[in-house]
Image: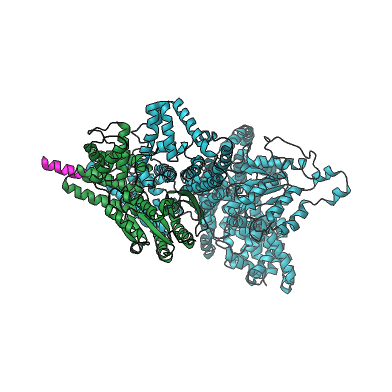
Chain colours: A cyan, B green
Amino acid sequence: MPQDIRSFFARQSSSSAVTQEKSRRKPPRISDEENSSPSKVKKAKHNDKSKDKEVKSRSKKRTIESSDEDDVKTVNVKKAKIEDSSKKVEIIEDPSSVFNKKPVKRINSTKVTKKESQKTEAKKSSKHPTAFEDDDFDATLNQLDTSQIEDEYLNSLKDDEKEHNKSGKKDKGSPENKKNENSKVNKDNVHCDVKTKDSSKKISKKDPHPKLEVEKSSKITKDKKKNDEYNEIIEENIEKKKQHAALYQNYLHRGGARNPGSKDVPEGAEQCFANLSFLITGVLESLEREEIEEIIKKYGGKILTTVSKKLNYLIVGDQPGPSKMTKANSLGVKQIDEDQFLNLLRTLPGNKVKIDNSKIQTNQQSPKVKINEENKSSITPIDSDKNESIKVNHKSPSKKIELMKISKVEIKKEELPKNLKLDTLETASNKNLKVVETKVKIEESPQSTESNIARVTALVEKYRPKDMKQIIGQNGDKSNAKKLFKWLSNWYKYHGCHATEKGVKTSWKDDSGITNKAALLSGPPGVGKTTTAYVVCAQLGLEILEFNASDTRSKKSLQDEISSILSNKTVKTLFSNTTDKSNATKPKHVLLMDEVDGMAGNEDRGGMQELISLIKATEIPIICICNDRASQKIKSLANYTFDLRFQKPRVELIRAAMMSLCFKEGIKITPDELSQIINSTNQDIRQVINHLSMMSASKQKSEQNYQEKLKNLKLGPWDVIHKVFSCDEHKNMKFRDKSDLFFHDYNIAPLFVYENYPMVRPNAPRSELLARLSKASSSLAIGDTIEKAIRSNQSWSLLPVQAVFSSVIPGTVMSGHMGVRPNFPSWLGRNSKSNKFDRLLQELTLHIRLTTGASKESVNLDYIKMLVNSILTPLINDGENGIDQAVAVMNEYHLSREDLDSLIELTQWPHTRDPMQTIPSKLKAAFTKAYNKNAQAFSNTGTTTKKKSARENKDDEYTDGNDEPLSDENEEDEKIENDKLIKAKTSKAKSAPSKAKTTAKTSKPSASKTAKKPSTANKKK
Amino acid sequence: MSLWVDKYRPKDLSKLDYHKDQAQRLKNMVQQGDFPHLLVYGPSGAGKKTRIMCLLKELYGNGVDRLRMDTMTFESASKRKFDISTISSNYHIEVNPSDAGIYDRTVVMDLVKTTAQTHQIDPTGQKEFKVVLLTNVDELTKDAQHALRRTMEKYVGTCRLILSTNSTSRVLPAIRSRCLGIRVPAPTIEEIKTILTKVAKKEGHDLPNELAERIATTSERNLRRALLMLETCRVEQIPYTPDQKVTEPDWQLYIKGIAALMVKEQSPSKLLELRSRFYELLTHRIPSDLIFKGMLQEINKKCDLQLKIQVANLAAEYEHRMHQGSKEIFHLEAFAAKFMSLYKKFMDASMADFM
């Protein structure tokens, strides 16, 4: 027999060596088998006697599997032996206990087995065969194996140890350890027996043992063979060290997941990883390290950092850490790849009760935990056995055999204390329960809280920068964050009661703001003002007192709450004179006034004034934050603050940061789409993240969502005009989409369309070209009438109609492609020029009104040409002699020198020449001089003119009213003008022409005009 | 030294050169002592303003010639203050309310009230009413015209309104019915010719009949324009010769150029060229209806009868639409594009027939 068996094992060992690789490749299957073994196990139960064969066959598989787990084997070998022996002992000893299911007896039995196990080690060889030959062929095999091992063990303990050490097993094989383990195993076995008879899954537990044994035997044979090889391995190790450096380099250079998001992450059952621990090595194919960690945490799994026995799974990716691998190999940890992991996630059922967590706890803790569990489970435990069986049933499909083992071992251990405790519990004060529960909770808390945080926090919060480098667009040396940092770090040097360099004057060039006691951060929302403030303060170790819009910030409340804080001194500084040192140690404060531009209304009455006075008197730095720097409210505050303006970060900056965020979150998005989102949010980082989180929430629909988002993106008029006319775009646009284009900016859209429609080359035969053009232009004209209706009657409901006429119809009719770049609407420029001419005409009409009754229109159409002629022809024809005549005409019509310029401008047509060019500049100067002489004569008409001039200036202002942007300008001009005018009149009017060169400024003509007008009136009188 | 237009402007009803019957009637009316509100209408350059001033002189004597310029400040309903310049004598006040744009209503209401509320202290020797002269009434908004309605009746005792307008079509019927309409038709060619020769003679020049005729026709019976042209001719060439060139106004030439361009070639690039020309006209504040008119006249010269009707139809349609809209250029261009398309089609068709 032994020979046969040996031969069998020899074969096994060779096969196992071969299959080692296989096992690595497909561990999940094996684990599946393990997990799904219950079915097989059931079979085994049905025919106890035929079990043996099955077990054998299985044991082969297991050997394959367990061949990885070098460490375990040696230990297990011994366990196995003992188990077997103890099993038999149990079976023999406690049939009654088994049938009665009395835990007490069981416990006794375990005790017995424990003792026995120790004793029986030597006896086993003899005992086992007799006891087992009938029942278990497998068992006999095992025993035989064990006998061999035992021989070895007994004869050469030390040899064994050496071997173990060499093979990298850290288990020093001390007999004590083994004993402990044996004892555990014994307990297990006791359990198992009980359970088999309770129709629970004893065999599932049994299975591993035989395998292990088989493996062990194979191992041992291997070990022997390998004795020589170990020396080589040592050499290899040296080589490995060399490789390490290279590996580390690889590690540094290895990228993220190769195909991020290429695999769907299935929804696992809740807490399905509970009780499991994972370790990830290498780069996974689709999941980033953070992602997978999050998944594991989400489902209650644990992530370990080093390979240990507690490790359940080693998730192996590309370029795994070699040390981890070897260690995992040596410990026999299951290695799975990413797919297998996902499978696991898919298949593992969830655990509603958090028993698992507690089971992982160390043995010492476990008793308490157990009790707690029992309390938690709705069935009140009277019989610990029942509980367990129930539990086992609960878990049965989900749990791994190993886990069950452990739990049972634990339970066994607990049984004594448990029983004691159970009594107390059952009689039981709730307090105890609570205490226990709280303990458990505390133990669980790290996991649960972590997962909770991961779920609860918004992306915006999750990725809020934690240090200055993370703030987008604030990395530069001249960035606001840096400035703020410097300013804050220097603050106590220059301000406060302990200032070392108080009252330092700095040049205006110095932009470090050290003279200011407060800083004002301003900028659009979502660029990171508040974040910057927080991060900078955190880095300087300053404590922040924040007041934002949610706090009342009226004068009173500010006084009450803040001023006390701002000016407080520690008592210590009052008593001790060594102020500087003590000051350095105490935590410094910063007052953060967020959203100061929101300080308004009754609530915050007087808040701004109070804030300013606070700044003046403050002993701590104050940081104010606002959006609208130009706001009236902020203006007064800005004088007292160190002005830091935040600009929107560039799109590329945001995009880079967002791409990495997307990777981490597993959001699939192309850079183009991302930059479009960024643009559409106006470079608001927070908004971008919000968009992204929405996308991540609806991953499957992201495609569709994106389509919708595209629609919502706001386009500039240049893009719009392209879309309006491009036939390529039209292909996949509905009518609605086309009309939506108009609404991107309905003020400018019609103008853009109008400006560019003749430039489009429509996809139509040449003969149709003009017809199409006229169609488009007619439609635009109708659109204009609609716009008039909209603007004059406020009938904004007509806007869609205008969209059709002003954008959709021209676009569709002219659908083609634009050869050239679209132009900016020239209408705007032309219109303002037209307005200017109108103003000039109005001015002229007003001036000549006393002489002629012509209306503006007829002045424009008929008079002006003749007027210019009558003034300039004498000059052109007669030169110096014509001056008098020209001046006479101008005086007759009360024209000013500027009026002449505007007259000339008005009569200027593209095909006409500027008549002034023909006049030599000398003559011009003489003419101007002569004119001024005349004007001077009229200028001393008395004080009434001043009044009138002022009034007329007002009048001019009115005429500008049509042109709003200009009117402001004029107002300012007029003020100056008035002053100048008065001076000019009292002294000499010579200055008039020189200052009034620009005809555009209507105020100026009026200035000189008024000088004459009263005089002419007087004349007539 | 003023232009001939102003220099030889008649100051007296009896000195008017044409429509003498009407002048006589006006004189009689004034001498009767009282007269209703007047609505003086007629094309520009027909002499409305001249006639009104003569009438005022007839009423009040030489005092009306002493004009002064004033600025009145008004406050709109929305508390916006604005000023309007007025020309006034002791007896009358002349205002162009449309200067105030959309606030003309306020002007009409306040001005009439303030003027009408004061009675003459000494009614002897003077008329007991003042005259408010409103020009460009057709440009008044509907609101302003409605506001005028009631005030006209209410203050009839103390003030008379003289409304001056080019066309009554844009004056509310209610206002028309409250006024005595006085139509001042444009002078005939003959009348203009006599005036031109008279003026030329006074200036010491001899005006050939042919030249006078041509000036009269080119001026489109606009006396003001005719006189200005006469003077322009003098500037260019003196003494007058019968075959002397009569310079048309620049804008008119420009419009003709546009029309010629439209007829000459029809293509998108020409449309763009037309657009810039339209812009040029519009920035020079040439009224867009004049542009339409000018274009149509010029195009009609070069079109077949059949096409003429169509084009006239088009022009009417687009001009009407233009008044409804706000951006004139759109409609001008639309007309141009439509015409070009129509013309091209017509030409192609006729060419095909011909072939």
> Magenta segment: does it hold B175?
no
In front of the other: A993 or B152: B152
Looking at the image, which is closer to me, A562 or B120?
A: B120
Count the marks: how many?
A: 0
Residue A778 seen in this snapshot: yes
Quadrant in which residue B242 is drawn: top left
Residue A705 locus on image (x, y percent): 45, 54
Q: Is residue A409 above or below residue A337?
A: below
Left of A490 or right of it: where is B72? left
The single residue placed furthest to the bottom in the displayed view is A427
- Residue B18 % position (x, y): 27, 49
Q: Position of residue A944 (x, y in %)?
A: 55, 46
Residue at 76% in and 40% down: A494
Q: Main secondary structure of the magenta part?
A: helix
Quarter of the image for residue A183 reads bottom right
Q: Which contiguous range is marked in magenta?
A: B343-355
- For the question of whether residue A737 can be seen, the reply is no
Q: Is residue A153 above or below residue A434?
A: above
Is residue B354 in the magenta section? yes
Please indicate whether residue B174 sits to the left or right of residue A663 in the image: left
Q: Is residue A738 above or below residue A875?
A: below
Residue that appears at 37% across and 35% down? A870
Q: Nearer the viewer, residue B10 or B123?
A: B123
